[in-house]
Amino acid sequence: MSTMDPQGLNTTTPRVNTHRCIPQLIPHRLLRDTQIHHPAVLEEAKRRSVNFHTRLADRITTFAGSMNFVFIHVVLFAVWLALLETYPWPILALVVSLEAIFLSTFVMISQNRQAAFQQAKADHDYEAQELELKTNTELTRQIQILTDELHRRFIRGSA
């Protein structure tokens, strides 16, 4: 959206991400608007979208970290305890243990990928900062050369 500032110059208002805040990177949502995301985020989203098992692991981890997951389990366990099994609930204990094993595995997989993403982003930021430092150093040197030349021509030349 373009607007006019008080000096009559055309300015653009920044785009705001209206997508829900999602703790996991879901590639199809990240790739919708490439102007609002860090290049390392986009690269990681593209890398994740390649493999089916990676997309599946991201979706499972995202769902397992939601309140819907908690609500569904509260209802399922209540029904199971009330209707399907008697004390001491051996099958329920087995199912819950197996689910915990698989969910913890998915969480670890997701954490490993998140660590790799953070490292890629840190590497990208480091390269960008190094380039900026090099550019600023060169500009500072050029300013110093120009200042010395001006000083030599106008101050020493008039004396």
Image: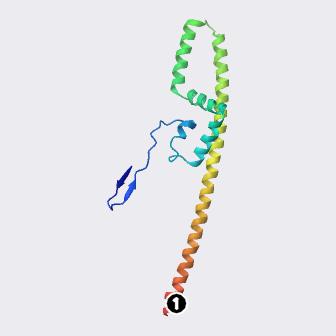
User: Relative to 48, is 9 on the left or the right?
Assistant: left
Q: Position of residue 156 (x, y in %)?
A: 52, 90
In x, y percent, where is residue 140?
56, 71
Residue at coordinates 60% horizontally, 30% vertically from top-left? 61
Secondary structure found at label 1: helix
Q: Position of residue 80 (x, y in %)?
A: 57, 10
Q: How many marks?
A: 1
Where 16 sits versus 131, above or below? above
Residue 21, can we see it?
Answer: yes
Colour scheme shown? rainbow
Amino acid type assigned to the residue bearing label 1 in the image: Arg
Q: In this rendering, is residue 74 above or below 115? A: above
Q: Residue at x 60, y 28 (%)?
A: 60
Which residue shows up at 62% across the image and 32% down it? 55
Classify mark 1: residues with Cα within 10 Å, few (<14), some (14-19) or many (20+): few
Residue 105, quarter of the rendered image: top right
- Residue extending furthest toward the bottom: 159
Q: Position of residue 147 (x, y in %)?
A: 53, 79
The answer to whether residue 64 is above or below residue 37 is above
- Residue 97 falls in image quadrant: top right
Instruction: Give whichever of 39, 89 is nearer the camera.
Output: 39
Q: Which residue is mark 1?
A: 156
Q: Is residue 25 visible?
A: no
> 38 or 151: which is nearer to us?
38
- Relative depth, front residue between 91 and 158: 158
Residue visible at 66% across and 43% down? 116
In this view, 105 is above or below 144: above
